Amino acid sequence: MDQTGVSTETPKSPWGSVAPAAPSCSLADVMSEQLARQLDEENNAFPTLTDPGADLLLSGEDPDTTSDLMLAQMLQMQYDREFDTQLRLEERKFNGDSKVSISFENYRMVHPYEDSDSSEDEVDWQDTRDDPYRAEKPQTTPRKGFTGKGKNITTKHDEVMCGRKNTARMDNFAPEVHVGDGLGMDLKLSNQVFNSLKRHCQSEQRRSARLHDKKEHSTAEQAVDPRTRLLMYKMVNAGVLDNINGCISTGKESVVFHADGGSLEEQPVPDEVVLKVFKTTLNEFKNRDRYIKDDYRFKERFSKLNPRKVIRLWAEKEMHNLSRMKKAEIPCPDVVLLKKHILVMSFIGTDHVPAPKLKDAMLGSDDMRSAYCQVLHMMQQLYQQCNLVHADLSEYNMLWHDSKVWLIDVSQSVEPTHPHGLEFLFRDCRNVSTFFQKRGVSEAMNVYDLFNAVTGLNITLRLNEDHVQRRGKKTFPVATDDGGPPLKPDADD
Ligand code: ADP
Ligand code: MG
């Protein structure tokens, strides 16, 4: 055996020994030997760590210091060794007398087998097929259910065996579950612990799948879900839109985007359009069911649809209501296209800047008075010609553009015959009269007069408990029985 542990004895050939052949020496061999020697000499000029020069360096003898590379290597070696000594001290200090110690080995500059003098430590990692850090998997019990004989018999119920097996089975958990390196530590997990870990992993997986699913299918706060995004891309691909520029508003029920119009079936689309994307986060719409389920136009379909499809009804409802308003020449967006829960309509504003809401518009008193007159007229038209009650009319849903008030956001608008129609109208009237009175419009009527002016009725109201019908938490004025006409208007189409 030589130093490297390789046997130097020539193995005896079973066929007998053959006399060694005389070394043949071709020209090519001579050439290559020369070349090898030459290369060897060149290499010697740059000793590596395993070179005799480097050994000198380690043993502290005066090495050859003529080469810069050599000097640099010497310095580096010295630095690395000092670093490692310091690291070892810190490791010892950190761990103290603790039974569980933390190894700083990975931070060492000189890897253990790089600077090891002992040939026993030398491991040729390249030749090791298996992961050297991976512990052996525990033995499986054979079919008969036990191993060994007599006293040394171990059954499959053996605590240590089971514990090791359980630890190994943690490998089968989902990849995202961090199980640590218990296998390497010869950890023995009891059945109870293993089972509860398994249950936890399974429930976690289900939970994350649910969350993922929700994320995929809902229109999130700012962004849109992948399905909606696809619909939007399709509109751009089909040329209906040239470009989708950005978000104008994110409300509770919808996200509104600004886009450049393209063309639809050869018809030009307005240069600037908005995409009103009704949110598919269903819970937001739960509170608004009453606007649609009692609307006879949608009642039949509402009951048959799943909640996702109900959202499309909102978009459809807004489209129908806008069309009615357009016919009555009420200033409102033009409908361009309805695609599932996305409504494309003309943009109210200029050069990407949306018209301000009436609440934000800085209007002089004349403009404010004019706005009031327009709103009054619009409410009358809406009620009498369109047979609609806005049901969310306020300074938030009226835009000021081109010295005109534009009505938007009519997805919840209902016909006056809706069971809550007049209640909604009364609320609209209260919002309008409060806003304009606050803004100093002296002509602004009080809520009751406005209600009469819109409906064309002439109800006299006595605000006494007998004459206020309570609906939910809100009070709703009704006609008295002193001969006045019934409040319920003649609202059929
Ligand atoms: P929400 O139901 O979320 O209130 P709206 O229809 O009121 O939806 O739209 C939200 C905001 O988006 C509006 O307040 C307005 O600023 C803007 N917006 C909606 N439609 C248009 C439009 N056609 N042109 C310009 N801005 C619009
Ligand atoms: Mg709105």
Image (cartoon, rainbow, N blue to C red):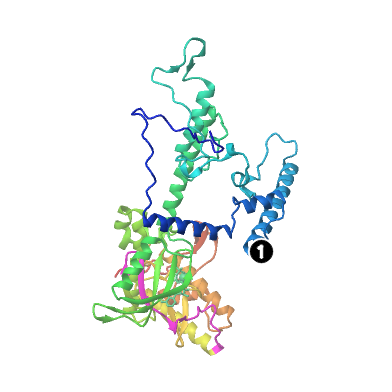
Q: Residue at 75% of width from left, 43% of height from top?
A: 93
Q: Quadrant of residue 3 in the image?
A: top right
Residue 71 spot, x, y in % from top left: 67, 61
Nearer to us in this view, 474 or 77: 77
Dot 1 crowding, Cα within 10 Å, few <14, some 14–19, many 20+: few
Q: Residue furthest top?
A: 150
The image quarter in which residue 258 lies: bottom left
Q: Where in the figure is residue 126, as x and y percent of width and height?
A: 48, 45
Q: Which residues are magenta?
A: 337-365
- The answer to whether residue 106 is left or right of residue 233 is right
Whether residue 117 sits left or right of residue 260 in the image: it is right
Which structural element holds mark 1? loop
Q: Is residue 471 above or below residue 360?
A: above
Residue most extreme to the front: 22
Q: Position of residue 310 (x, y in %)?
A: 35, 58
The number of numbered badges drawn on the structure is: 1
Q: Quadrant of the C terminus?
A: bottom left
Does the beta carbon at disc 1 come under 8 Å from ligand 1?
no
Q: Nearer the viewer, residue 156 or 77?
A: 77
Q: Position of residue 80 (x, y in %)?
A: 67, 53
**Ligand 1 quarter of the rendering:** bottom left
| 231 relative to 14, above or below | below
Residue 317 at least partly seen: no
The answer to if 112 sits in the magenta stretch is: no
**Residue 444 or 12: which is nearer the viewer?**
12
- Identified by mark 1, the residue type is Thr
Q: Looking at this view, is 272 or 212 the one in front?
A: 212
Figure check: 31 above or below 6: below
Name the residue that disc number 1 marks.
66
The quarter of the displayed image where residue 459 is located:
bottom left
Q: Which residue lies at the image location 47% right of the left edge and 84% below the top edge?
A: 373
